[in-house]
């Protein structure tokens, strides 16, 4: 454990060096402005419904965008398709997929931000042509689990066209994610807290403006199988000095995003979010999960308050390739055994709790908490056994 904590500190130091080292600053002389602002448009209806507080979330393909280290927590191949309705009839489309390679997960994502063509008018009010405006980005990412933490990185290609002006640039993201063991009042470890840190869009300028470099630090905590909440701290650091300039940096570009998710039997999901220091503050989302044969699909939708620009809607469908189909009846039976196991757990009947949790796992191997509970209780059982042996040895000495 001591060695893993040392490695964690080491990776934190490396990531912070990327953040603060001057040679990775590509700022325009004016400071505080950035190019390719479409890179800040959120990806995924689930994250959007939770206020884009997603840096520390695990097991979701949208980690490609928020923190590539999260790819290291995936279990199955996954693909998602997203459509988002923005202001003035503009559109944002995204396709993301991830699959296992070399004990980790590779991720690919492409996004298109498109504005309908509009007339080009000269100073006399005459139409002289049509203006085309669109942006495209492509991301290749990889996330890997080191056991005690996850690390990840991605490379981006960015293309922008505004009328006859064409811009190209490259950038990369880097991130880490740490799942932390805490202890409940019953002395049993609970592995449902994760912390994430990522830096986004380190790269070449978009003409005269730097890319919107974001520093994200997040927390994700699942209080129970039914409820979880996330919090993100986000700083738009155009230059390294912005990190220290509390007058302009934090007041104008520092944001706090928070989100919650309610889960009913891994079938229905209800989400809400709030973005502090943002023109559009409230977000809401819904999700529906179902499986046919060996393919599970999730349909998500989100609503965002965009202030004076009105509401923004998004829709995402996600496909997962899974080895076993779980019916609604299986999920209900699994939940019954899981709740029984929790009752045994509270009354300190470890063997009874383990037995019920294993029954729950038999019905639903994808239950988010059951594997962790079994592992935690078996560790606690072994710890108690060792303590009993130690007490017997001490009694012999006496």
Image: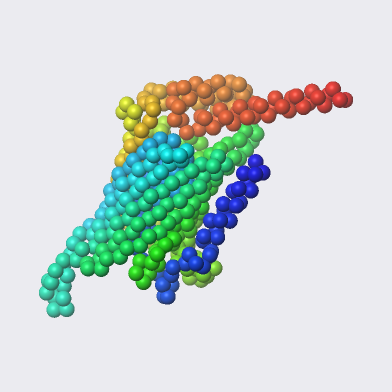
Q: Is residue 96 above or below residue 377?
A: below
Who is closer to the viewer here, 301 or 381?
Answer: 381
Q: Residue at x 35, y 57 (%)?
A: 157
Place of residue 365 in the rendered image (x, y in percent of width and height, measured from the top left): 45, 27
Where the N terminus falls, by quadrant?
Answer: top right
Is residue 384 left or right of 287 when viewed as pictured?
Answer: right
Who is closer to the viewer here, 114 or 68?
Answer: 68
Q: Residue at x 59, y 31 (%)?
A: 376
Which quadrant of the figure has residue 206?
Answer: bottom left
Is residue 86 left or right of 68 when viewed as pictured?
Answer: left
Q: Is residue 92 above or below residue 353?
A: below
User: Can you name the residue that lies furthest to the front here?
Assistant: 102
Colouring of the image: rainbow
Residue 285 shows in the view: no
Where the C terminus falls, by quadrant?
Answer: top right
Place of residue 203 in the rendered image (x, y in percent of width and height, measured from the top left): 42, 62
User: Can you name the residue that lies furthest to the right here?
Assistant: 398
Is residue 145 left or right of 320 when viewed as pictured?
Answer: right
Who is closer to the viewer here, 391 or 343?
Answer: 391
Q: Is residue 362 above or below residue 113?
A: above
Give the number of callouts.
Answer: 0
Place of residue 185 in the rendered image (x, y in percent of width and height, measured from the top left): 64, 36
Q: Residue at x 61, y 24 (%)?
A: 350
Q: Is residue 258 above or below residue 248?
A: above
Residue 330 shows in the view: yes
Who is closer to the viewer here, 84 or 394?
Answer: 394
Place of residue 291 in the rendered image (x, y in percent of width and height, measured from the top left): 33, 30
Q: Residue at x 44, y 36 (%)?
A: 75
């Amino acid at each position: 454990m001591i060695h893993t904590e040392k490695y964690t500190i080491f990776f934190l130091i490396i990531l912070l060096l990327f953040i603060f080292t001057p040679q990775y600053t590509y700022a325009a002389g004016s400071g505080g402005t950035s190019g390719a602002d479409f890179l800040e448009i959120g990806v995924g209806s689930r994250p959007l419904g939770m206020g884009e507080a997603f840096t520390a979330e695990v097991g979701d393909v949208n980690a490609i965008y928020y923190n590539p280290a999260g790819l290291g927590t995936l279990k199955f191949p996954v693909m998602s398709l997203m459509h988002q309705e923005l202001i003035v009839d503009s559109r944002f489309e995204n396709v993301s997929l991830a699959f296992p390679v070399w004990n980790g997960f590779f991720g690919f994502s492409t996004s298109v931000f498109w504005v309908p063509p509009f007339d080009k008018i000269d100073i006399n009010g005459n139409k002289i042509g049509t203006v085309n405006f669109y942006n495209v980005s492509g991301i290749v990412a990889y996330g890997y689990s080191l056991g005690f933490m996850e690390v990840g990185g991605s490379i981006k290609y960015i293309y922008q066209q505004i009328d006859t002006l064409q811009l190209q640039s490259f950038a990369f993201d880097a991130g880490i994610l740490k799942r932390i063991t805490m202890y409940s009042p019953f002395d049993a470890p609970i592995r449902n807290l994760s912390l994430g840190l990522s830096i986004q869009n380190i790269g070449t300028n978009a003409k005269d403006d730097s890319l919107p470099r974001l520093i994200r630090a997040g927390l994700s905590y699942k209080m129970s199988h039914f409820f979880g909440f996330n919090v993100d701290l986000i700083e738009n650091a155009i230059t390294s000095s912005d990190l220290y300039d509390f007058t302009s940096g934090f007041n104008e570009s520092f944001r706090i995003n928070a989100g919650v998710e309610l889960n009913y039997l891994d079938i229905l999901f209800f989400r809400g979010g709030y973005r502090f220091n943002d023109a559009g503050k409230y977000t809401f989302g819904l999700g529906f999960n179902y499986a046919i044969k060996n393919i599970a699909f999730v349909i998500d939708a989100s609503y965002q308050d965009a202030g004076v620009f009105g509401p923004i809607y998004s829709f995402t469908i996600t496909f997962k390739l899974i080895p076993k189909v779980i019916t609604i009846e299986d999920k209900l039976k699994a939940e019954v055994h899981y709740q029984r196991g929790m009752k045994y757990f509270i009354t300190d009947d470890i063997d009874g709790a383990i037995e019920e949790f294993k029954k729950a796992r038999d019905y639903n191997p994808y239950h988010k908490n059951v594997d962790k509970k079994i592992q935690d209780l078996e560790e606690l059982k072994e710890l108690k056994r060792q303590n009993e042996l130690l007490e017997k040895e001490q009694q012999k000495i006496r």
